[in-house]
Amino acid sequence: MIFLNPAVLFGLLAASIPVLIHLFNLRKLKRIEFSTLSFLKELQKNKIRKIKLKQWLLLALRVLIILFLVTAFARPTLKGVAIGGTTSAAKTTAVFVLDNTPSMSVVDVKGSYLNEAKAVIKQLLGQLQEGDDAALILVSDQSADEVKSISDFAAFQKQVDAVKISDASGLLNAAIVKAAKVISVSKNFNKEIYILSDFQSGRLSDDGTLSDLSQLLNDKVRLYSFNLQSKQAFNIGIDNFKLNTQIFEKDKPVSFSATVTDYSLQPADNLVVSLYINGERSAQQSISLNAGDSKSLSLEAVVKQNGFVDAFAEVEDDDILQDNRRYSNLFLPKEIPVIIFTDDPFDARLLNLALTVIGGETALTVTEKSLSQVASVDLTKYSVVVITGSENISGGAGRLNSFVNNGGSILLMPGAKSTLQGFQKLSIGLNIPAPISAAGNINSTNSIIKFDKVDFNHPIFQDLYSNKEKKNIESPDIYYHFKTNTQGKGESVISLQDGSAFVSEYKIGKGKIIALNTAPVLSWSNFPLKSIFAPLINKSVYYLAIRDQSQNEYFAGGSALIDLRNNNSPQIKIERPDKTVDYVDLQKQPDVSFYEYKKTDLAGNYKVFSGANILTEFSVNVDPHESVIRYMTNSDFEDYLKKINFKGKYISVGKNDDPVKVVTQARFGSELWRYFIFAAIILALVEMAVARNTKKEIVGIKA
C-alpha cells in the first residue's frame, strides 16, 4: 500500500488523544468500611469486569476512528491488487507526444518550452518500472514510419535528450493518430498518452482530416495534456520571399520582394530586413510594423556570378528564430541551349540572326533541326525549343506537350508553309487555343494590320525601352496572320487592331509557351525588318529559359521532388543546408524522372549534384503557420477529443502542477479512502452504541 497524500499521516498523532484522556480519567477507588460482609456478596463482580472491558473497547474504537479518518485523508492506494478494474502494479505503455516544432523554442523563466517538456518526460520516465515500455513521437515528424515502444529507459532517455527544435511543422492530430496506433497494439494493462506542447492555434488538425479513433483510443486509455505555453511571445516572421525579376544576367540588379508580419501584440519599430546573396549581405531596409500588421518591401542587389545563386531575407532576432529567415534561389545560366525546329530552313534564317546578334554575358547556342525530327530529339537538353512551322511534325506534338508540362519552354510561330489547319492541329496538341481563322493575304499590302495594345509590364520588355520610348514603338505591317484569341487561358502581350493576339503567353503545367500569330518571313509581314524584331525574339528566349525556381520551394518536413531528367550518373549527392551530405543510389530506381526526397527537416537551400556538376537546387522554408502565436484553450482541445470520439480518460495538467503527483493520482485507480471513511463511520456508530450501554450499566451499579 502507498499513500498519495502522505503528509496527512502526521495526523496519526491525534490517535493518542483518547488514550491520554482515558488515563487522566482513571480514578482511585475509595475505601469504604462495612459492618458486615453481606454487602460484598451483593456486588456483581462479573458485571464490573464487563464494564472495564467495554471501556477498553471504547478506547480502541475511538483510536481506530481517528486512525481511519487520518488514513482516509492520506489517500491510501493498494499496489499490486486490482480493485474496480485498475491496478498500480499492472504493466504500462507510455507514449510521449513531444512537440518540437519552431513555436516550442519560446523561452520563459523556466527555459524553452521544449526543455521544459523534456524535463517533464524525465520525471515521468522515472515512475516507470521493469516490464513497462515507452515510445516517443515527435510532432515535427511527418513521415509514415512505424513507431515502436521500447523497454530500455536509458536508451529512451537518450532519444529524448537528443531532440532539438525542428524547422519542420506538424499537426498534433497526426501525432496523436500515431500514438493511438502504438497504444492499440500494446498488451499492457495501463495505456497512457502524454501530449507535451504549447497547443498552438491552427496546428491541431486540417479541416476534414479527423477520423473516428474510438476503437484505438478506448476506455482503457488515459490521455494527459501538458500545456507549456506561459507568455505572450514577441515574434516577427517573413511569410513570403520571391524573385520579382524574371530575366536576369550577371552583374545586373535582381529584385526580390519580402512580406514581413508582426504576429505579436506589440509594435516593432525600425525593424531591419536584410537581403543576402550567396551568404553576403547585399541590401537592407528598415520598416516599422503595428501589432498584427504585414508589409511587403522590395530588396534589390547585383548578381555577380553565373550558376545557382542562393538568396535569403532575414529579420532581427525575436522569441521564435526559425521564421526570421526565408530562402530562395535562382539560376543564372552561362549559356542557353536553344533548338529551332522548322518546316523550311529558310524560315529560321532571320530567327537565328535575331538570337545571336545581341551579345551579352549569357550566350545563346542555337541548333537547327527539321520539324519532322521532333520525336527523335532529346528535348531535355535544351532550355528553349523554337518552332516555326506546323506541317511536318507528325507525332511530335505529344512530346512537345510533355516537355512543356515538365517545365520546358517553347517559342511558337507559323512557318512560311504553315496552313491554318496544320497550325490549329499543333496548337490543340500543345493544349493552347487554336487560331479561329486566317486574315490578310501573303505578299499583299492590301489589308495591312498593325499593333493595337502592348503590355509593357511583361518581362520581355524589361530594360528594353525607356518609358518615353514605350509610347512610340513602331508597329510592323502585318500582311497575313492567324487570328488567335487567348480565350482566358493565357495573356495577350501584344494585340492587333482586329483584337487578335500577335504575341501571347500560356502557362502549361510547369512550363511556358510564347506564341506569335505570324511567320518570321517577309512574305507575311515586315516584322523581321523592324527594330523591335531582334530584341523581342531575343528577350522572349531569355525569358523562356529562366526556370521558375518558386516551384522548387518546399516547407520543412515535406517531400521535395528532384528533377532527374538531365542526370547521367547512377548516384546523386544532396548537400543539405548544414553541409551534411546524402547519397542516393539511383540504380535501385531505374527510369525515374523525379526522385522524392524526404529529409527536409532543415530550412535552407539544398544542392543536388550529378557527379561533380550541380544538377539542381531547391529551397526549404518554415511553414508560416508556425509564426502564429495564438493558442488553444483546454475546451478547444476537449472539443477535438469529442470529434475523434475519444473514449478514454482525459487529464489536463497545468504548467505549475506536479506532473508525477497528477499522473500517480490518475494511474492508481484503486484508492481506498472511501473504504476507510466508511469504516470510520461504522466504528463511530458502534462506539455510540457501546458508550450508551456502558453508561447505563455504570448508573445501575451506582444505584
Image (spheres, rainbow, N blue to C red):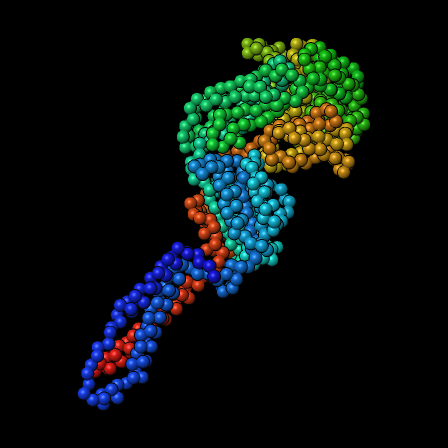
Horizontal side of residue 231 vs 573, given as left or right:
left
Displayed quadrant of residue 571: top right
| Residue drawn at the location 70% of the way across and 25% of the way down | 614
Horizontal side of residue 43 vs 591, given as left or right:
left
User: Dividing the image into 4 quarters, which one contains the C terminus?
Assistant: bottom left
The answer to whether residue 404 is visible is no
Displayed quadrant of residue 206: top right
Question: With respect to residue 312, does 250 lie above or below?
Answer: above
Question: With respect to residue 240, does 184 lie above or below?
Answer: below
Of residue 606 and residue 64, the one placed in the foreground of this image is: 64
| Residue drawn at the location 32% of the way across and 80% of the way down | 50
Question: With respect to residue 657, does 394 lie above or below?
Answer: above
Residue 539 is situated, as x and y percent measured from the top left of the image, at: 65, 16
Residue 74 is situated, as x and y percent measured from the top left of the image, at: 40, 59
Residue 15 is situated, as x and y percent measured from the top left of the image, at: 34, 64
Of residue 454 and residue 339, the one placed in the foreground of this image is: 339
| Residue drawn at the location 59% of the way across and 21% of the way down | 279
Horizontal side of residue 585 vs 100, given as left or right:
right
Of residue 496 and residue 506, the one placed in the foreground of this image is: 506
